[in-house]
Image: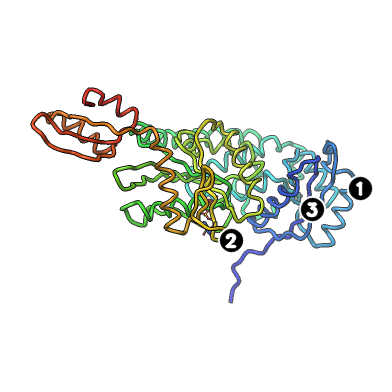
Amino acid sequence: MIDNTPRKVKAYLAGVNLDDSNFDYYMTELANLAQAANMEVVGQSRQNLEHVVAGTYFGLGKINEIKDMAHGLKAEMLVLNDELSPVQIRNLEKMTKLRVIDRTELILEIFSSRARTKQAKLQVQLAQLEYELPRLHPSENNLDQQRGGGFANRGAGESKLELNRRTIGKQITIIKKELSAISGQEEIKAKRRNQTHIPKVALVGYTNAGKSTTMNGLLEEFSKENDEKQVFVKDMLFATLDTSVRRIELSNNFSFILSDTVGFISKLPHNLIESFKATLQEVKDADLLINIVDSSDSNMIQMIRTTQNVLSEIGVKDVPMITAYNKADKTDRNYPQIVGSGILYSATDSESIKLLAQLITKRVFASYRKVNLVVPLADGKALANLHEYAQIILEEYKTDGVHVTARLAPEKRAQFHQYIV
Ligand SMILES: Nc1nc2c(ncn2[C@@H]2O[C@H](COP(=O)(O)OP(=O)(O)OP(=O)(O)O)[C@@H](O)[C@H]2O)c(=O)[nH]1
Ligand SMILES: [Mg+2]
């Protein structure tokens, strides 16, 4: 039998701790990232410092110690917990005789291997090229040869050798143009959605927390349409890179737009966030965010904080948020239940999904008010509009018009104020 599973690259992890109380957590994340990039983590070290060493990141003694440890464990690669300068990487490679990659390159590599759609591929390529641009230096060409691309699927980096700065610059321009054409089309769709006044709810949160599973749960429970609408779910970091937008139709004529998008992790490279702006637009436009959290993970608090940090980095402020503590089935707590203004639930449990939908309804339709209207029989358009956007409670055809009792959003109350009695 042929074994098709790619061989795992043995990696040694290391980082400088600048007295950061989250350091252990970042190293745990780094190990998860390395595994997601098909590496086998064989060991790790840290150095406590007040500042990183400008030219080499670690101090000399530590570098020798890492070199001995890593070679002793047959590591082929040294993975570092921060984004390093090109000089630091070059020096460390020379001194340790290991291929060195930093946290940013590692994250970019994972995104690159996950990208499926044209937009995602271009966004990742753009971030990779922007990462490489300042790292391309005439004196580094030799280094590229030394580095030899031992790392799987180099993606945008595969032809790095031939690419000089200018061609990279040109490529960046072309990709940006292509991306703006794609996001132009997306914007038109988004505008159409924004005009409808249907509330927009976005699922956000740490990668692998269960955002896509939650979306599928809501679709299964509340969408009349078929399975094609289901989104991709997998137990891995960054399964989702593209935004999916669906309409959820609750009973009583309430509906909202739900979007599922890329997950977050600490120290997401700035370039990557920048190039995923179009994908994250749905989050910025949302009326309500559901912050999905894996409640069975011991690092839950840091994960919540990570999501808050990324949200503020992409400029999301003042959007109301519900915290949804998922995967309760993996804990010993009773679920579903309301906790504070949030919910403890399991995305694969139907009762949980119903309670989550109730909570969303309460929040997004809070500004809806019950009104009585008399719509003239001649104004069929208004009636059709009400049918689409209001929760109709009662409707009677009388000689003076259609008497309607309905719950309406503030904009709709303003639009039909002349018919409100
Ligand atoms: N036990 C349990 N597993 C769950 C639950 N929700 C999701 N999962 C699992 O968690 C893994 C990740 O779920 P996804 O829905 O893909 O997570 P995501 O937040 O969309 O992740 P990314 O798109 O990778 O950021 C999958 O293996 C799911 O089956 C849950 O309530 N209970
Ligand atoms: Mg997902």
Q: CA distance from mark 3 to mark 2?
A: 45 Å
In the figure, residue 330 lies in which quadrant? bottom right
* Screen quadrant of the N terminus: bottom right
Who's the residue at 59% across and 41% down the image? 307
- Judged by depth in the image, the label closer to the viewer, 1 or 3, is 1
From the top left corner, tell me how far across and down residue 173 is, in percent: 55, 32
Q: Secondary structure at mark 2?
A: loop
* Residue 143 against residue 169 in the figure, above or below: below
How many numbered discs? 3
63 left or right, relative to 409: right
Report the disc number at residue 61: 1
Identify the residue position indicated by label 3 in the image: 98
Identify the residue position indicated by label 2 in the image: 332
From the top left corner, tell me how far across and down residue 63 is, in percent: 86, 48
Q: Secondary structure at mark 3?
A: loop
Q: Nearer the viewer, residue 377 or 124?
A: 377
The amino acid beneath tag 2 is Asp
85 left or right, relative to 246: right
- Judged by depth in the image, the label closer to the viewer, 2 or 1, is 2
Who's the residue at 84% across and 38% down the image? 55
Q: Residue furthest bottom?
A: 1
Q: Are marks 1 and 3 in contact (CB under 8 Å)?
A: no
Q: CA distance from mark 2 to mark 1?
A: 47 Å
Chain-order first, disc 3 or disc 2: 3
Q: Residue furthest left?
A: 399
Q: Nearer the viewer, residue 59 or 349?
A: 349
Q: Residue furthest top?
A: 418
Task: Mark 2 and ligand 1: say if the CB distance to the nearest ligand atom is below 8 Å.
Answer: no
The amino acid beneath tag 3 is Leu
